[in-house]
Amino acid sequence: MHVSSEQRLDGDVRERAFTLDGIPGFLWTPAAASPSAPVPLILLGHPNLGLDRMYPRLVGRALHAAADGFATATIELPGSGARPRLPALDRARAELRRVMQAGEPVTDDIIDAVVLPLVEQAVPEWRSALDAVLALPEIGGKVGYSGGVIAIGVRLALVEPRIAAAGLFAGSFVPRVTVEEARRVTVPLHVLLQWDDEGNDRQAALDLFDAFGSEEKSLHANMGGHTGVPAYAGDAAARFFTRHLK
Amino acid sequence: MHVSSEQRLDGDVRERAFTLDGIPGFLWTPAAASPSAPVPLILLGHPNLGLDRMYPRLVGRALHAAADGFATATIELPGSGARPRLPALDRARAELRRVMQAGEPVTDDIIDAVVLPLVEQAVPEWRSALDAVLALPEIGGKVGYSGGVIAIGVRLALVEPRIAAAGLFAGSFVPRVTVEEARRVTVPLHVLLQWDDEGNDRQAALDLFDAFGSEEKSLHANMGGHTGVPAYAGDAAARFFTRHLK
């Protein structure tokens, strides 16, 4: 983990921009984090729009989490932002756009082609980032995963035993294998669904929620469109992590 | 409003048992409620099992609300508890039981016969109770409605302009007219759904949530079966009322 720059944000939160095996990322830690009082970590997932574009929203989530006593970290997704494009993924996305613009059905095969290569490559990278961040003496305790591409969140919750709780955003395409993996997920889950999100397949989101094997799972459906998650929904997600990671 | 008995509960909450036109009810007020500092009111709905049987759960909700600075009130439903039976309702319930035991479909007509007479008679009674309670100098400000038979909650939210926010429990039969009324409801709504409630028609609950006309509506689906609403779900409902009634 190579720290490329460092600054202090509001509330004395420490922001480190880093690269890890060439992948850019950020780590935010509350002022109180120290080797004698390590703080638990929440991994901040995000859609594949590039870290630069997502930065303002990520910092907002990081500051909120820091106020609750959590460190947060995120890394760039494969093929996004400053990372090399993935031609196969670009082709699959072009096909998805074509199909949607033509009003044709979005088949399971198209969804698989758009999402699964991302999952396959991203999940090992996020696990490596977890290794690197947890090696820091001021970070310790339980780990949560929050938001982003839901198929990545499901895979991480399934294969990464250090993740103790996950907050997922039911707002993207759900591959068939993700539903099967969801049945074997057992960590507590807090699932956000924007009920009136026109770009979202609501029934697919409800079916995925139903599939999760977790004994504790909550679905929070709100209004406000794709990007209009109400502030009180963010507060509820924060309380979920406090309940399970502290 | 005739107060028949009075006692102090934990946390110095004042409980008044009353009758209003022969209908038994309860009023709970926090210690701080006074004519110079009136507190907002939440009406506590409940299933038609009789106030005696529901008393422990109602007191629990009343103490929680009092700690948040709310008065709470409830009255007996028509045909329940110490009130005279309603023969037509009893016949409709017997038919519902017969149909369910025989594994036959529960038709819309049966649902209407079981629920609508209750709505027709209960709603004016709850509005009269609201008149009586709001006439007390230590009660004032906005009014919320919480829980109980969802068709009663929907009708009250629609016809009673003093209700500023409603928390509903999506756990009972939904008559067709209730879905139509829901489209015209505009107050903020917090809807609880027990996802794994075997006695609940989940799709009917989701359809009803979708129908509500309110700009702010949230669906909170949790695990735990019909009576197993998690404590954190109760806390979330309490924050909803604090946000809208304070």
Image: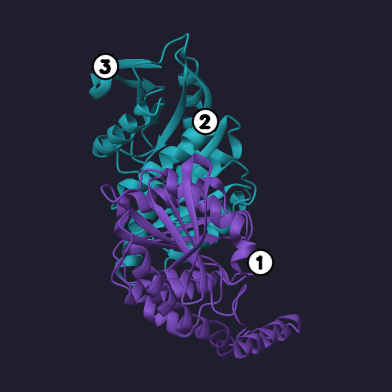
Chain colours: A purple, B cyan
Position of residue A37 in the picture relative to residue A238 (left or right):
left
Q: Mark 2, mark 3: which one is toward the viewer? A: 2
Report if residue B19 is visible in the image. Answer: yes
Mark 1 secondary-structure assignment: loop
Mark 3 secondary-structure assignment: strand
Q: Is residue A102 above or below residue A143?
A: below
Q: Percent position (x, y) of residue B30?
A: 35, 20
Q: Residue at x 41, y 47 (%)?
A: A30
A80 and B236: which one is in front?
A: A80
* Residue A198's disc number: 1
Q: Percent position (x, y) of residue B110?
A: 45, 60
* Residues marked 2 and 3 touching at CB (< 8 Å): no
Label 2 Cα neighbours within 10 Å, binned few <14 / some 14-19 / many ≥20: some
* Residues marked 3 and 1 touching at CB (< 8 Å): no
* Residue B5's disc number: 3
Amino acid type indicated by mark 2: Leu
Amino acid type indicated by mark 1: Glu
* Residue B245's disc number: 2
Q: Is residue A185 above or below residue B87?
A: below
Amino acid type indicated by mark 3: Ser
